[in-house]
């Protein structure tokens, strides 16, 4: 079983992973944590930079009794002549899990197809399911799932996986993007199948009006640096300011570009639950790895 996107899990499985994550988090906090992945190894392939994903997966494996190997762009042959399918089959002969952060979503699909161990998507241009697991854990801890969330910004990888996860757990979600930056139709159709597609709008105020939580991400994602000027221009009016957010909780997957999608004041305010979100990457992924090891 792989996690290429959130909807590789059934809704019951998604709740089971979140429950497992919460149990592991509680055990770590009260000093009773077990090490169910002793002697197991996670291979971590990174084509793009990472702080949270890299450190949380590596630390998570250590805490679970296992080990993680960082495989950056200059460390392995992937991208320098060896096809993905060969990397997938060879690395599968050594490790127990593969986590990969790649540009093209089709690359993780191919990796998962050829690998013989579970493959976990650590972000592609289209999806970021591990972030969604942590986001849902954070929302569940703070508000439960009977709450309303507004996504304000780009209909990007983080947004798309969140749309799917939100549909699965029944969050009331509205997505506000500038015209031309909407969530893919395919993702909206999958969300609809899973529960309900979010409301969509190009008006951030309309999305925020009835929301308890406001979520944003960078306007210029990794690999889009050449579109920077154009995007900064087209996203004008979508910034999360303290005035706009009011007393709502604020989420951001990080890293944040202060002064672009969010002001420094908003990110530093007590409304921001971004550090809980970041911490929950660790717990959510530990829950996922342990759950995958039992399938
Ligand atoms: N949110 C997230 O995935 O952060 P990194 O890019 O630092 O891994
Ligand atoms: N949308 C951002 C998320 C980073 C975690 C990017 O792809 O760069």
Image (cartoon, rainbow, N blue to C red):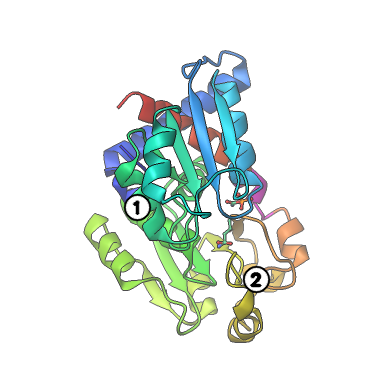
Task: Provide the residue span drawn in magenta.
Answer: 271-277
- Residue at image position (67%, 55%) is 271
> Residue 174 or 258: which is nearer the viewer?
258
- 49 on left or right of 150: right
The residue carrying mark 1 is 109
- Residue 261: assigned label: 2
- Residue at image position (49%, 66%) is 150
- How many C-alpha atoms fall within 10 Å of the one at disc 2: few (<14), some, or many (≥20)? many
In the structure shown, which secondary structural element does the residue marked by tag 2 occupy? loop
- Residue at image position (58%, 72%) is 224
- 166 on left or right of 113: right
Q: Quadrant of the N terminus?
A: top left
For disc 2, does the CB lie below 8 Å from ligand 2? no
Q: Quadrant of the C terminus?
A: top left
**Could you give the CA–CA distance between mark 2 and mark 1, rounded to whole angstroms?**
30 Å
Instruction: Classify 192 as above or below 277.
Output: below
132 part of magenta stretch: no
Upstream in sequence: badge 2 or badge 1: 1
């Amino acid at each position: 079983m792989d996690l290429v996107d959130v909807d590789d899990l059934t809704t019951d499985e998604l709740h089971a992973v979140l429950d497992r994550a919460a149990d592991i988090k509680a055990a770590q906090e009260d000093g009773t944590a077990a090490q169910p992945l002793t002697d197991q190894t996670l291979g971590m392939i990174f084509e793009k930079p990472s702080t949270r994903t890299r450190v949380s997966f590596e630390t998570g494996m250590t805490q679970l009794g296992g080990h993680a190997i960082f495989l950056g762009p200059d460390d392995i042959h992937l991208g320098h002549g060896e096809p993905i399918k060969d990397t997938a089959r060879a690395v599968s002969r050594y490790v127990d899990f593969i986590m990969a952060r790649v540009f093209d979503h089709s690359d993780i699909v191919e990796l998962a197809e050829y690998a013989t161990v579970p493959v976990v998507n650590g972000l592609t241009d289209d999806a970021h399911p591990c972030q969604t697991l942590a986001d849902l854990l954070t929302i569940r801890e703070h508000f439960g799932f009977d709450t309303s969330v507004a996504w304000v910004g780009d209909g990007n990888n983080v947004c798309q996986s969140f749309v799917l996860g939100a549909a699965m757990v029944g969050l009331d979600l509205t997505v506000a993007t500038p015209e031309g930056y909407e969530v893919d139709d395919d993702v909206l159709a999958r969300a609809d199948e899973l529960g309900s597609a979010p409301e969509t709008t190009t008006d951030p105020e309309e999305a925020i009006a009835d929301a308890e939580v406001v979520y944003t991400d960078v306007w210029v994602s990794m690999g889009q640096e050449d579109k920077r000027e154009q995007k900064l221009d087209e996203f004008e009016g979508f910034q999360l300011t303290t005035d706009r957010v009011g007393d709502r909780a604020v989420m951001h997957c990080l890293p944040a570009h202060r002064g672009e999608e969010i002001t420094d004041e908003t990110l530093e305010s007590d409304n921001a639950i971004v550090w809980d979100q970041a911490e929950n990457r660790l717990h959510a992924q530990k829950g996922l790895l342990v759950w995958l090891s039992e399938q």
